Image (spheres, rainbow, N blue to C red):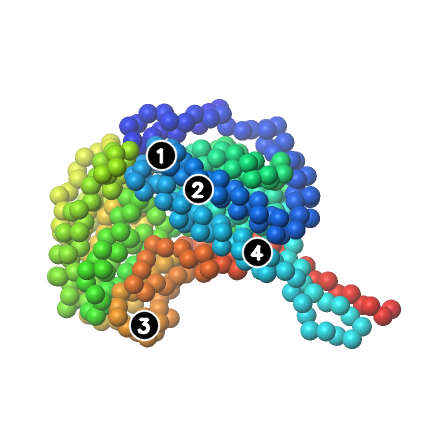
């Protein structure tokens, strides 16, 4: 059985791979278990050196890897290499830099006649299930810390971006990682569920949809293993009257439309103080008009196609639902069907009875709604089943902190959005998932505590 990657660029088959099954999966699991037994005994500093070399190998090839990524999922080639040069490299290097200290034994205050400490033990084999929208960024959040912690890793990429998994394998081989410590599998959902249920897998790191998160939980239900779930978002932004207009608009347009809005932490709804609502909307629309939709392989393109025509049609349907319920589109409505190329849209006169303000859009459309005050903004931001990130745009940091304490979210931004700082825990609440990656806390999630209680005078 084969899987095909249909390029959104032109509808051609860009990659075709045979799916692993049966003995191939069994062999992969056995290799992972055997290799991990040795890898866990490698000093953390040496593990970090291997991961650094892997990341450097990828960054040195950012242009060709970025171009093949554009072919696989449609992001403009002018932007795709940046996923490797910036976020991917920054996160890998940061996690390697803190690994020795973060993974060191926790020493307990001395007690006469005893030695006591807590050791962070690896889970064993970690299965990483990574999506297509930011395949390098989302996967590095789990692959590198899992390896730093002494685990073996099996990576399953979404079928839209299988080459990312293969390039990881090449990079780790070049970096000198022992054979079997990192492997990848191209498998379907049913095979992935069976792997999750296999006793040789000690932890699952999943990034994807809420539905996918539920599927992972069901697959793991018969076992007592951990599962980190980084799921969807409907991330809000609140623009206060004191926000500087030009940089706020520029940053929010980028937060809404970068990667054609195909990001779990894209800004998908904006609430603006009614005193500046008109001027904000006018500036936002004018800035959005500067985006150039087109072939992602052309350097002047700033907005590429969505990953599939069906995904674009789903966004078109959400926009039309809003219009049917009274929303006003401020840009020409893209009524085409059957193409992944979708013009951006800005909607006003919106409310939370519209799916565009309640359910994940994952495309180049946003609703903008006026609010009376902070309290109304907080109520509307919290009126969601999601809670991944939220942002406030203001000149008052004290107000930002006070408001942030009342907003249900995993990350609270002031005057920025759609960014992961590797020093901070990346986490969500409600239907945006559980667990965390990045930061010291994220690294520790790929371990389990083991207590040593030694009585010395016996």
| Mark pair 3, 4: CA separation | 32 Å
| Name of the residue lying farthest toward the front | 60
Q: Quadrant of the C terminus?
A: bottom right
Q: Is mark 2 on a helix, strand or loop?
A: helix
Q: Identify the residue position indicated by label 2 in the image.
A: 59
Residue 448 - label:
none
Q: Which of marks 3 and 4 is nearer the N terminus?
A: 4
Q: What element carries label 3?
A: helix
Residue lying at 63% horizontally and 38% vertically, measured from the top left: 178
Q: Which of marks 2 and 1 is nearer the N terminus?
A: 2
Residue 397 - label:
3
Q: In this view, does 228 lie to the left or right of 268?
A: right
| Mark pair 4, 2: CA separation | 21 Å
Q: Which of marks 2 and 3 is nearer the N terminus?
A: 2
Q: Earlier in the sequence, mark 4 or mark 2?
A: 2
Q: Identify the residue position indicated by label 4 in the image.
A: 99
Q: Identify the residue position indicated by label 1 in the image.
A: 67
Q: Where is residue 291 in the image (x, y as percent from the top left)?
A: 20, 45
Q: Position of residue 66 (x, y in %)?
A: 37, 37
Residue depth check, mark 2 versus mark 1: number of the one nearer the observer: 2
Closest to the observer, 333 or 61 = 61
Closest to the observer, 90 or 153 = 90
Residue lying at 25% horizontally and 34% vertically, measured from the top left: 298
Residue depth check, mark 2 versus mark 3: number of the one nearer the observer: 2
């Amino acid at each position: 059985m084969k899987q095909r990657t249909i390029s959104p660029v032109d509808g051609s088959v860009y990659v075709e791979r045979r799916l692993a099954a049966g003995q191939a999966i069994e062999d992969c699991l056995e290799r992972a278990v055997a290799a991990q037994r040795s890898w866990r005994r490698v000093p953390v500093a040496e593990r970090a050196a291997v991961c650094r070399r892997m990341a450097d190998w990828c960054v040195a090839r950012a242009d060709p890897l970025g171009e093949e990524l554009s072919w696989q999922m449609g992001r403009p080639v002018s932007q795709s290499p940046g996923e490797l040069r910036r976020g991917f490299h920054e996160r890998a290097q940061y996690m390697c830099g803190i690994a020795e200290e973060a993974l060191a034994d926790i020493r307990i205050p001395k007690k006469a006649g005893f030695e006591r400490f807590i050791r962070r033990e690896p889970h064993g084999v970690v299965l990483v299930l990574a999506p297509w929208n930011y395949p390098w960024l989302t996967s590095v959040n789990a692959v590198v810390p899992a390896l730093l912690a002494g685990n073996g890793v099996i990576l399953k990429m979404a079928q839209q971006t299988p080459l990312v998994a293969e390039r990881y394998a090449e990079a780790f081989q070049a970096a000198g990682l022992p054979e079997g410590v990192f492997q990848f599998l191209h498998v379907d959902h049913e095979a992935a569920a069976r792997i999750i249920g296999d006793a040789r897998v000690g932890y699952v790191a999943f990034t994807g949809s809420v539905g996918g998160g539920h599927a992972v939980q069901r697959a793991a239900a018969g076992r007592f293993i951990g599962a980190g779930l980084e799921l969807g978002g409907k991330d809000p932004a609140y623009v206060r009257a004191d926000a500087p207009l030009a940089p706020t608009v520029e940053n929010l347009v980028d937060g809404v439309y970068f990667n054609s809005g195909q990001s779990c932490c894209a800004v998908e709804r904006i609430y603006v103080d009614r005193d500046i609502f008109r001027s904000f909307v006018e500036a936002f629309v004018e800035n959005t008009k500067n985006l150039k939709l087109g072939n992602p392989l052309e350097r002047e393109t700033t907005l590429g196609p969505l990953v599939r025509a069906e995904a674009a049609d789903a966004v078109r349907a959400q926009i039309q639902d809003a219009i049917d319920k009274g929303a006003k589109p401020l840009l020409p409505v893209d009524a085409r069907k059957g193409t992944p190329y979708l013009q951006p849209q800005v909607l006003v006169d919106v409310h939370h009875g519209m799916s565009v303000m309640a359910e994940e859009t994952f495309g180049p459309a946003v609703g903008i709604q006026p609010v009376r005050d902070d309290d109304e903004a907080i109520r509307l931001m919290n009126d969601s089943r999601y809670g991944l990130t939220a942002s406030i745009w203001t000149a008052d940091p004290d107000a930002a902190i006070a408001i942030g304490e009342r907003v249900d979210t995993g990350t609270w931004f002031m005057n920025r959005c759609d960014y992961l700082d590797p020093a901070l825990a990346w986490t969500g609440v409600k239907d945006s998932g559980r667990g965390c990656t990045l930061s010291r806390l994220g690294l520790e999630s790929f371990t389990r505590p083991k207590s040593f209680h030694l009585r010395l005078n016996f």
